Image (cartoon, rainbow, N blue to C red):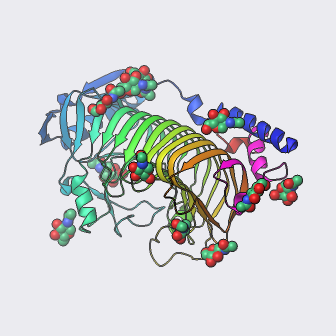
Amino acid sequence: MLVALLLLLLALSNAVSINGDGTCDSIPTLDPRPHSVSIREFGAVGDGKTLNTIAFQNAIFYLKSFADKGGAQLYVPPGKWLTGSFNLTSHLTLFLEKGAVIIGSQDPSYWDVVAPLPSYGRGTEVPGGRYQSLINGYKLEDVVVTGNNGTIDGMGMVWWDKFSSHSLNYSRPHLVEIVASEYVVVSNLTILNAPAYSIHPVYCSNVIIQNISISAPPDSPYTVGIVPDSSDNVCIEDCIIIMGFDAIALKSGWDEYGIAYGRPTKNVHIRNVYLEASSGSTLAFGSDMSGGISNVLVEHVHLHNSHSGIEFRTTKGRGGYIREIFISNVEMENIYKAFSATGHCGSHPDDKFDPHALPQLDHITLQDMTGKNITIAGNFSGILESPFTDICLSNISLSINPVSPFSWECSNVSGYSVSVLPEPCPNLNSSWNSSSSCFTLISSNIHGNSKASVL
Ligand SMILES: *[C@@H]1O[C@H](CO)[C@@H](O)[C@H](O)[C@H]1NC(C)=O
Ligand SMILES: *[C@@H]1O[C@H](CO)[C@@H](O)[C@H](O)[C@H]1NC(C)=O
Ligand SMILES: *[C@@H]1O[C@H](CO)[C@@H](O)[C@H](O)[C@H]1NC(C)=O
Ligand SMILES: *[C@@H]1O[C@H](CO)[C@@H](O)[C@H](O)[C@H]1NC(C)=O
Ligand SMILES: *[C@@H]1O[C@H](CO)[C@@H](O)[C@H](O)[C@H]1NC(C)=O
Ligand SMILES: *[C@@H]1O[C@H](CO)[C@@H](O)[C@H](O)[C@H]1NC(C)=O
Ligand SMILES: *[C@@H]1O[C@H](CO)[C@@H](O)[C@H](O)[C@H]1NC(C)=O
Ligand SMILES: *[C@@H]1O[C@H](CO)[C@@H](O)[C@H](O)[C@H]1NC(C)=O
Ligand SMILES: *[C@@H]1O[C@H](CO)[C@@H](O)[C@H](O)[C@H]1NC(C)=O
Ligand SMILES: *[C@@H]1O[C@H](CO)[C@@H](O)[C@H](O)[C@H]1NC(C)=O
Ligand SMILES: *[C@@H]1O[C@H](CO)[C@@H](O)[C@H](O)[C@H]1NC(C)=O
């Protein structure tokens, strides 16, 4: 017992030293751009009625010429700036002043239709193409979307209605989508009413999402806050996210398309966030995870008023993996299901998926958490042919709602736990010790053998 305790303490202190190395700890400061123009200079009118798509496109086209001169800023003054979708360029800062609101047009004809992402093979909601995001980046570097708490309002209602009535011809657009880019910052803004996802970095490296407030109504269908997708070196911090479905969802492609594309989401650091997700999960992994998800550090988070707190989702046919996930210092309140890991969640893009492509889920550590008014502590439902392993729970105390039907349910899963209340199911009830993989995961992070792949 003493040995186990010492090892546990060692493990916990080791974890602290990983934190000191997280992606959010090495954020460079942003230099001001040497050139700045206002969107007004391109004929934009901030009356909430005039369509300004051409003004945004022309302004950004003009600012391209400053790329090799330190880049430029496009300044959006107070006003209501209605627009269809437009593309960003490299070495650009889009700055939204306090009182500036970029409003997405509610007419789908002002949103271009683009090809599906290769790692998904088709639109995720409707087969075929998808609407381009309102603010789009493709193959860029050094792009900043920021402000003095300006707002981007996607006016998603029209899209939510079309989704709910099955009248979409293409999959819904996202609000800010940056594809195949490096050095991306989204900060100091309010983002409202996304048609689907609010911020979607996909195939990106070095992404910082800081001090953002994101919301959509609780009944907005499948609206998601931030979706790091096949991206690496991502920092998300100091954000408040209140969504209809998931608040933060990590993804990496869909079945055979995601396996073929093969780009994982890794080295993600999330800290100091407040999340609510009414019908989904505040923190979700998958279910599209075919390129793999690993090396994720989440710390100091508040999860409130939601269906699920922390959820891992996958299904047969996905392939890929979810592993080396370390989540600590979590406070939950009014959550129906605190933890969920399921191997039976999600649909397939088409009938070409390989049912023998089994996903793997292992080396997940959840520690230092409290929960109030939780109905179900955890449901861990692994896959018979590929059980979930090395799930470690430590120092977790959940107060369970008296009407709870059961606290834990486990199948095809194994792991360890120390100081967990209510007491977990027997599969997760073995204490960890020096030869257990749980301890190895944590210690290997500091001893350097997997250092490069840790944050
Ligand atoms: C915007 O970028 C997309 C690629 O993401 C491209 O297909 C489209 O033509 C661009 N639109 C404009 C107006 O440049
Ligand atoms: C967050 O953004 C607000 C304005 O949106 C600003 O006043 C505040 O200083 C920012 N905080 C940090 C930590 O950057
Ligand atoms: C930012 O703006 C939103 C809506 O405009 C407002 O609710 C929020 O309080 C503002 N935040 C700060 C830090 O000023
Ligand atoms: C979808 O396509 C149909 C037939 O082409 C058309 O009538 C309808 O307006 C389209 N819906 C949207 C949302 O574009
Ligand atoms: C956010 O705004 C604050 C206050 O103006 C500023 O100090 C900070 O540098 C900004 N952060 C980013 C990442 O833009
Ligand atoms: C307890 O949490 C549930 C959500 O699981 C919520 O509906 C209910 O209102 C909460 N109860 C209290 C007393 O806050
Ligand atoms: C637990 O999750 C599995 C898989 O998602 C589901 O089939 C099962 O019904 C859940 N158990 C309970 C009691 O909700
Ligand atoms: C247990 O977790 C709580 C936070 O939920 C933390 O304050 C406390 O220090 C942790 N205890 C140990 C022994 O690490
Ligand atoms: C493993 O999962 C399968 C369904 O995938 C279920 O039939 C079986 O009972 C589970 N095994 C155990 C030991 O719970
Ligand atoms: C879990 O382990 C504890 C201590 O090792 C033991 O007292 C308890 O009976 C076990 N519970 C189950 C459900 O196996
Ligand atoms: C330590 O863990 C390993 C692997 O789970 C197990 O085989 C072994 O029996 C455990 N040893 C002790 C002393 O609990």
Task: Tell me which residue sits at (26%, 58%) in the image.
Answer: 160
Name the residue nearer the viewer: 109 or 441: 441
Residue furthest bottom in the image: 351
Name the residue nearer the viewer: 195 or 57: 195
Q: Quadrant of residue 166?
A: bottom left
Task: Tell me which residue sits at (22%, 42%) in the image.
Answer: 103
State the extent of the magenta-drawn residues as a range: 418-447
Name the residue nearer the viewer: 140 or 77: 77
Using the image, determine if residue 316 lies above or below residue 445: below
In the image, 206: left or right of 117?
right
Q: Quadrant of residue 170?
A: bottom left
Q: Percent x, y for residue 102?
A: 24, 38
Q: Is residue 440 visible?
A: yes
In the image, 69: left or right of 367?
left
Q: Percent x, y for residue 346?
A: 48, 67
Is residue 446 a member of the stretch shown in magenta?
Answer: yes
Q: Is residue 149 visible?
A: no
Is residue 378 a member of the stretch shown in magenta?
Answer: no
Using the image, determine if residue 105 lies above or below residue 20: below
Of the 4 image quadrants, the one containing the C terminus is top right
Name the residue nearer the viewer: 9 or 173: 9
